[in-house]
Image (spheres, helix red, strand yellow):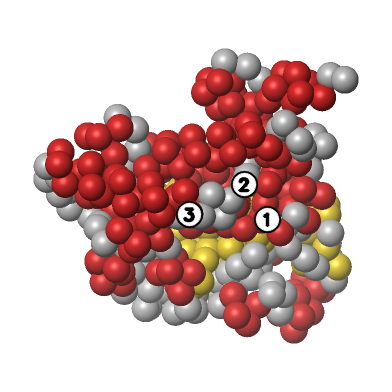
């Protein structure tokens, strides 16, 4: 991905450079794209190629080269979307490749394999697991990717991620992002990031008009940054001992006050930590000790309650869901029913039956 201040997202000269070589090797379906790339927030880019060089060019700003290692016809594809200043993608490559590339220092890019049929080697480390591939850092990256690899990933401005971290986390993350490397993250965090990327791309494909809603885009952006922060911190942060119950009550009370003072905004965990003056781990322990839920679950409960109240007057279930930052309507309905014992459509119908 380009430095996101410079990209927006397309480099016309770069696209022109590859135009002739891609003409016969690249077939694509573009939704909301002009000149081969996107023309607005939430636009989906989908392309397929039958040449490794053409495939390498699809992720702009990565300055990549792909050398095909295994024998056989190459088939590759990419799905990519930009939500505000966050870029999400899923890339599929049918043959083993030796990849190398380098990103701008202003960009943090992380990948998690969705499918890893055989061992891979990333920056000198061999893995058969779904490790966290940190592509950013001085000196670029080298990657032996096996045949049949499906990689999901995200690229964000460094400043955007750091704004989403607590004060005490920024120094740690900055040190760890000095060079590209393979890290081991919490399995649940790996699944969460990979799943979130897929859900956003599906939304951009199936319901692109929804991503025209700025409030919803900001909620998606906040969710992606939170997933990325949680994943990176799960790789590197050391656990802290649980806070005492009395102090935990005080911290939860301050956090709750802050959350309720910003009920409709996509409040992130880092904002709560900075407002309360504690680390992410301490906040997690306090909520678990005092309320038996995580801060994320508490935030979701507050938003679900807000959506439930809004359903009394909203024109539609969709209006209430989007207003409160829910963009995956299947999960919204499921979470709503789990919380309140009925579907949001049933609540809406009860107040609008007349």
Q: Is residue 292 left or right of residue 204?
A: left
Q: Which residue is mark 1?
A: 215
Please, what secondary structure does the residue beneath circle 1 have? helix
Q: Which residue is mark 3?
A: 261
Q: In this picture, is 235 found above or below 346?
A: below
Q: Is residue 287 left or right of residue 258?
A: left
Q: Which residue is mark 2?
A: 325
Q: Is residue 110 left or right of residue 71?
A: left
Q: In this picture, is 100 found above or below 211?
A: below
Quadrant of the rendered image containing residue 94: top right
Classify the position of the N terminus by image quarter: bottom right
Q: In this picture, is 297 found above or below 104?
A: above
Residue sitting at x 56%, y 34%: 305
Instruction: Give the camera-side residue of 75 and 299.
Output: 299
Instruction: Give the camera-side residue of 190 and 212.
Output: 212
Label 3 crowd bin: few (<14), some (14–19), many (20+), radius 10 Å: few
Residue sitting at x 53%, y 49%: 263
Between the residue at mark 2 and the residue at mark 1, the CA separation in whole angstroms equals 7 Å
Between the residue at mark 1 and the residue at mark 3, the CA separation in whole angstroms equals 18 Å
Mark 1 or mark 3, which has the lower sequence index? 1
Whether residues under marks 2 and 1 lie with C-beta atoms below 8 angstroms apart, the answer is yes
Q: Position of residue 155 (x, y in %)?
A: 53, 63
Mark 3 or mark 2, which has the lower sequence index? 3
């Amino acid at each position: 991905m380009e430095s996101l201040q410079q990209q927006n997202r397309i480099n016309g000269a770069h696209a022109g450079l590859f135009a002739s070589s891609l003409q016969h090797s690249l077939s694509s379906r573009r939704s909301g794209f002009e000149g081969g790339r996107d023309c607005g927030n939430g636009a989906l880019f989908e392309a397929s190629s039958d040449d490794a060089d053409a495939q390498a060019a699809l992720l702009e700003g990565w300055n990549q080269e792909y050398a095909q290692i295994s024998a056989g016809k190459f088939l590759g594809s990419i799905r990519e979307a930009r939500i505000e200043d966050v870029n999400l993608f899923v890339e599929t490559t049918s043959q083993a490749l030796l990849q190398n590339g380098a990103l701008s220092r202003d960009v943090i890019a992380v990948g998690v394999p969705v499918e890893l049929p055989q061992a891979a080697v990333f920056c000198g480390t061999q893995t058969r697991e779904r490790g966290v591939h940190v592509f950013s850092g001085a000196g670029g990256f080298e990657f032996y990717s096996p045949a049949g690899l499906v990689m999901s990933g995200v690229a964000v401005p460094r400043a955007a991620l750091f704004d989403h971290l607590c004060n005490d986390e920024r120094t740690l993350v900055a040190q760890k992002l000095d060079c590209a490397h393979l890290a081991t993250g919490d399995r649940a965090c790996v699944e969460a990031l990979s799943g979130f990327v897929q859900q956003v791309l599906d939304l951009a494909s199936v319901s692109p008009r929804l991503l025209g809603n700025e409030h919803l885009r900001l909620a998606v952006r906040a969710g992606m940054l939170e997933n990325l922060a949680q994943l990176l911190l799960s790789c590197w942060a050391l656990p802290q001992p649980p806070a005492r119950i009395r102090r935990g009550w005080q911290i939860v009370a301050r956090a709750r006050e802050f959350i309720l003072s910003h009920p409709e905004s996509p409040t992130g965990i880092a904002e709560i930590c900075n407002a309360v003056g504690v680390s992410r781990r301490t906040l997690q322990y306090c909520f678990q000790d005092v309320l038996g839920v995580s801060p994320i679950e508490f935030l979701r409960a507050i938003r679900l309650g807000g959506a439930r109240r809004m359903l009394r007057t909203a024109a539609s279930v969709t209006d209430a869901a989007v207003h409160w930052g829910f963009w995956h309507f299947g999960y919204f309905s499921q979470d709503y029913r789990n919380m309140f014992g009925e579907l949001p459509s049933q609540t809406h119908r009860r107040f609008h039956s007349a």
